[in-house]
Structures are given as structure tokens and as C-alpha cells.
């Protein structure tokens, strides 16, 4: 597992860079501290009430990208982007806003995959209460790697989680071979 672990670590650095760039651009805030969470203990409390997620699937590889959030924290950030109160007081708009963040990260991850290997298909992003995640159990047959990052700025916190699974771990490496080069030229565009 030594070489595999090293390969995953370099791949995860690419994903981390992409997630950070998307987060800072989308929330118009570069002051957030991003920290990778390692070795979260089973049963450890995650105090976020909401979860937005998107799934990417292709060539025997499944990637789930999740963002755990509190509505109140999102409202504070949306106030900086949208000056009209109707936006930050609408819970549906807040959910749409965070779903679009997941969609951007999903597109970014998809663009890192080798096109000739097979494009990753994306689900529509969805929002659940954080407790609904129990309906997405870990599949013990699959090789699965889980990575988490927390974004913090003062009292505002978000957590992102990436779950990569495959029946054959080599498929993950094949699919994202060259992701480092693709990440370096990737350009974030808002329409």
C-alpha cells in the first residue's frame, strides 16, 4: 500500500487545491483557513445540521463530494455577495447557493479526469439534513478513501468531505492520471 498511499496523497493534494480555489472564489472570501482533518474517530460529533452533496461516477469509480454546513453561516457569507435581504433570508436560496458550490467542485473534479478514459457523470446536487447521511452507508466491498477538510473563519465553519471508491483502486489512478497538470491550467469561470 506504500506506493498506492503515496499516489493517493499526491492526488488528494490536487483535489484539496481545487476545492480551496473553488471555495474562496465562490464565497468571495480568501480569509478562511483550510485544514485537513485526519483520523476522525468513529462517533465523533459533527455538529452541522445540513449536508449538500454531489456524486460523480464513471469507469468503476465513484466520487462523493459533500459539504456540511449551517444555514446561519451561509447567510452571513451570502450577505457579502448579495446585498438584497431577500436572498439571505430565503432558506431555499441558501440551499441553492450551497448546492451550486458542490456543482462547481464536482465540475472541477470531473475536469481533472482523463477524458479518453471515460467522462465522469455528475448527479444533480442535493441538500439533506446532516442526519439523513445514514442512508448512504459505506460499501465494504469497495476500496474506499475518505478525506475531509474544515474551513474556518472566526465562528463560521464548513466541512467538506470527499469519498472515493472503486472495486479496483487502479481505476482511480488511471482515471485521474495527469490531474496535477490539469489542475495547474484549470480556470474557474462564473457565468
Image (cartoon, rainbow, N blue to C red):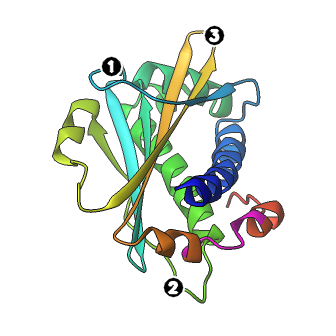
Q: Give yes or no for residue 177 being in the magenta stretch.
A: yes
Q: Reading the chain from its start, which is encountered first: label 2 or label 3?
A: 2
The residue closer to the viewer here, 22 or 78, is 22
- Mark-to-mark CA distance, 3 and 1: 22 Å
Q: Residue at x 64, y 53 (%)?
A: 6
Q: Residue furthest left?
A: 135
- Mark-to-mark CA distance, 2 and 3: 42 Å
Q: Label for residue 154? A: 3
| Place of residue 93 in the rendered image (x, y in percent of width and height, measured from the top left) | 43, 39
- Height in image: 163 above or below 165? above
State the quadrant of the C terminus. bottom right
* Neighbours of disc 3 within 10 Å: few (<14), some (14-19), many (20+): few
Q: Residue at x 41, y 24 (%)?
A: 70
| Place of residue 145 in the rendered image (x, y in percent of width and height, measured from the top left) | 44, 51
Instruction: Say whether marks 3 and 1 touch (CB < 8 Å).
Output: no
Does residue 136 appear left or right of residue 169 in this picture?
left
Instruction: Say whether marks 2 and 3 touch (CB < 8 Å).
Output: no
Q: Give the magenta range.
A: 175-180
* Neighbours of disc 2 within 10 Å: few (<14), some (14-19), many (20+): few
Residue at label 1? 44
Closest to the camera, between mark 3 and mark 1, is: 1
Does residue 9 appear left or right of residue 122 in this picture?
right
Residue at label 2? 118
Amino acid at each position: 500500500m506504500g506506493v498506492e498511499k503515496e499516489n493517493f496523497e499526491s492526488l488528494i493534494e490536487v483535489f484539496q487545491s481545487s476545492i480551496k480555489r473553488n471555495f474562496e472564489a465562490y464565497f468571495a472570501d480568501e480569509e478562511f483557513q483550510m485544514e485537513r482533518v485526519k483520523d476522525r474517530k468513529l462517533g465523533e460529533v459533527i455538529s452541522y445540521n445540513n449536508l449538500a452533496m454531489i456524486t460523480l461516477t464513471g469507469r468503476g469509480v465513484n466520487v462523493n463530494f459533500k459539504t456540511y454546513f449551517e444555514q446561519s453561516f451561509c447567510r452571513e457569507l451570502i450577505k457579502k455577495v448579495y446585498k438584497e435581504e431577500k436572498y439571505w433570508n430565503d432558506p431555499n436560496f441558501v440551499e441553492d447557493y450551497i448546492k451550486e458550490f458542490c456543482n462547481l467542485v464536482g465540475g472541477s473534479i470531473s475536469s481533472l479526469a482523463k477524458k479518453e478514459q471515460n467522462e465522469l457523470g455528475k448527479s444533480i446536487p442535493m441538500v439533506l439534513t446532516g442526519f439523513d447521511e445514514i442512508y448512504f452507508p459505506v460499501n465494504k466491498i469497495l476500496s474506499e478513501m475518505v478525506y475531509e477538510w474544515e474551513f474556518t473563519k472566526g465562528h463560521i465553519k464548513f466541512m467538506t468531505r470527499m469519498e472515493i471508491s472503486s472495486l479496483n483502486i487502479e481505476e482511480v489512478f488511471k482515471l485521474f492520471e495527469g490531474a496535477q497538470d490539469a489542475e495547474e491550467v484549470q480556470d474557474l469561470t462564473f457565468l
